[in-house]
Image: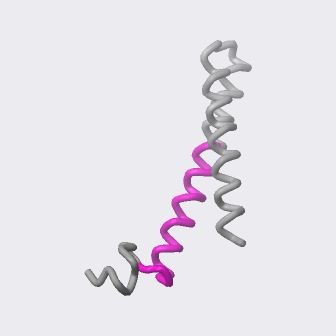
């Protein structure tokens, strides 16, 4: 691997495939985190006390992922 040209990056700086894979991973993470938050909310409605933590983790992860997605688009 020519580390001088791509400065040690596995896919290189201008690689469209690398950016597409990263963006797809972020979107999948965002959908999974929102799903986790919804499962936690339904669990809270059902009266399960640990569901509060599930909902909180889902919200925290979805906020972080949304910020990451937003910052990649700029």
How far across and down, in percent of the image, does residue 1 sit?
26, 80
Question: Which residue is drawn at the image coordinates 29% and 84% (left, top)?
Answer: 2
Q: Please say whether residue 72 is one of the residues in the magenta stretch.
A: no
Q: Position of residue 34 (x, y in %)?
A: 66, 43
Q: Residue furthest bottom?
A: 5
Task: Using the image, determine if residue 29 lies above or below residue 10.
Answer: above
| The residue stretch that appears in magenta | 12-33
Residue 52: name its quadrant. top right
Q: Nearer the viewer, residue 12 or 69?
A: 12
Which residue is at the front of the view, 54 or 64?
Answer: 64
Q: Position of residue 28 (x, y in %)?
A: 56, 55
Frontmost residue, 46 versus 63: 63
> From what the image shows, is residue 67 above or below residue 7?
above
Q: Residue sitting at 69 percent across and 13 percent down? A: 47
Determine the main secondary structure of the stretch shown in magenta: helix
Residue at 63%, 23% (x, y): give it.
Answer: 53
Residue 9 is left or right of residue 31, and the answer is left
**62 vs 41, nearest the viewer:** 62
Reply above or below: 48 against 74. Answer: above
Above/below status of 19 relative to 36: below
Q: Quadrant of residue 74?
A: bottom right
Residue at the image point whose x is 46% and y is 78% from the top: 17
Assess whether residue 31 is covered by the magenta stretch.
yes
Residue 21 image point, x, y percent: 48, 69
């Amino acid at each position: 691997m020519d580390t001088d040209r791509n400065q040690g990056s596995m896919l290189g700086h201008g690689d469209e495939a690398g950016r597409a894979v990263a963006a797809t991973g972020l979107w999948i993470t965002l959908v999974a985190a929102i799903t986790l938050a919804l499962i936690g909310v339904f669990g809270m409605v059902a009266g399960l006390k640990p569901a509060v933590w599930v909902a909180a983790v889902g919200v925290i992860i979805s906020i972080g992922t949304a910020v990451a997605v937003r910052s990649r688009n700029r």
